[in-house]
Amino acid sequence: MHGNETPTSAFQSPILFMAKRATTMRAEGRDVIDLTLGEPDFNAPEHVLDAAHLALGARLTYSPSNGIEPLRKAIRMRAREDRGLDFGDDQIAVGCGAKQIIFNAFQATLTPGNDVIVPAPYWASYPAMIKMCGAQPIILPTTASEGFRLTAEHLAAGLRLAKLPKWVVLNAPGNPSGSLYSETELQAMAEVLRHYPDVMVLSDDIYAEIRFTQDPYLTLASVAPDLAERILIVDGVSKAYAMTGWRVGWGCGSRSLISAITTVQSQNCTQTSTLSQLAAVAALEGPRNFLAERNAIYRQRRDAALHVLRSSDKLEVSCPEGAFYLLPQIKTGVDDQTLALDLLEVGVATVPGSAFGLPGHLRLSFATDEATLVEGCKRLVRALEAYS
Ligand code: PLP
C-alpha cells in the first residue's frame, strides 16, 4: 500500500466515481446530463410519505435487528401474494437496503478459499463484497446473443471450476442487463444446482417489480421449491417504491442463514431506521397501481432512448425486459473507459461496461425524464461520429 491507498481503495465504486465527476462538472457550470445512477427519479408514493409523517409523532426507539414485526409480516404477505412463497416470521431479516443484507449474508458465510459464482455483466458490488469477505468471485461472462443470461451449461462449468463453491449469484431483472430468466432456464439451472447440495443461491430480486413484459415474475425458489432451503431472496423498497434513501431491504431464506445474517446485523448497525421501516410497511401494504403506471413511463423512455441509440451504426443495443438500464455495445475501436471520459467532455455521463465485467459497453440509466435522456443519447451518438 502506498500514497493515498487504503485497504479499501480497490473497492471504490466506478459508478459513484463517474457520478461524482458529473456532479463536480455541473457545479462548475458545465452542461452535463447524468445517466450514471441507478436511482428512480420518482418520489416515494404519497401514502408512504403520509405514513412516515404519522410515524414521526411516535417514539422511535431501537427495533429488533431482524426488523419490526409489522414489516416482517408485510414482507411475508408480499412473498405469498406476489410469488406464492410461504416464509415463517423467523425466515425474514431486514437491513439497511438490499445491499446490507447481501453483505451480511456473505460475511456470515464466506471464509478465505471460498468461491462465489457471479455471472457478468454484474452489479459491481458483488465482486467487491465477496473479496472484502476474503473469498473469490468466479466471473462467468455471458453474451448479448444469450440475452446476457447465465446458461445451465455455463453454470455447470463454473461450478466444476470452483474449488470451494459457496454461492451462486442470480440477479433478474439484472443490473445492468435488464434480462429475465424463463421457467425453462431456471429449471435447467436448478437441475445443475441439485448436484451441489452445499451451494447456496443469492437471488437478488430487487428489480422484480420493474418489468416491461406481461409475464408473471419468476424467481428460482418458486420454480424449484426443493431448493428453497438454500436460496436467499433479496429485495427492498429502493427501486420499485423509489425509496433509495430510506435504506430498507430484506432477505428471505432458511432459518439458520437468517439467524446468522441477523447476528451480523446486530453487531454492525443494530437495525435500519425504525422510521424507514414504518414507511416500508406502508409501501408493501398500500395501493399498487403506481407500479404499472411507472413501468409504463420507464418503458416509454427505454423505447425513446433505443430509437436514438439504434440510429447509430457505431452502437448495438439489446432491449432490456426490466430494470432501468441500457447497455449499448460500442462498435468502434475506442475502449469503454476512454469513451466514458470523452463523453463527459461533450456533456453526457455514463458508466463504462468494464465496471460491470463487460468491457466494450456503456451503461446508461433511463431513470431520468425522457427529454433529458433523449438529449443525452443524442450527445452520445454525435460524439461517436468522431471515432472510426
Ligand atoms: N442489487 C442490485 C442489483 C442493485 O442494483 C442495487 C442497487 O443499485 C442493490 C442490490 C442495492 O439496493 P439497496 O438500495 O436496497 O441497497
Image: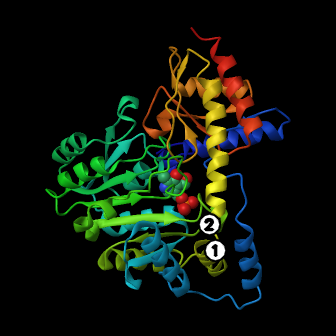
Q: Residues within 10 Å of mark 2 (few under 14, many from 20)?
A: few
Q: Quadrant of residue 387?
A: top right
Given the current orientation, which residue lies at the most extreme left position?
A: 195
Circles 1 and 2: CB atoms closer than 8 Å = yes
x, y (%) of residue 355? 49, 38
Residue at 60% across, 48% down: 38
Percent x, y of residue 104:
42, 68
Q: For the residue labelled by badge 2, is the local secondary structure a helix, a strand or a loop? A: loop
Q: With respect to residue 288, does 130 lie above or below?
A: above
Could you say whether the residue bearing mark 1 is in a helix, strand or loop?
loop
Residue drawn at x 63%, y 74% as measured from the top left: 286
Which residue position holds label 1?
A: 286
* Residue corresponding to mark 2: 288
The disc placed on residue 181 is none
Q: Nearer the viewer, residue 216 or 14?
A: 216
Based on the displayed image, in which of its 4 quarters is residue 152 positioned?
top left
Residue 302 position, x and y percent, is 61, 38
Question: Cβ of disc 2 within 8 Å of ligand 1?
Answer: no
Q: Is residue 286 above or below residue 111?
A: below
Vertical comparison of 43 with 144: above or below: below
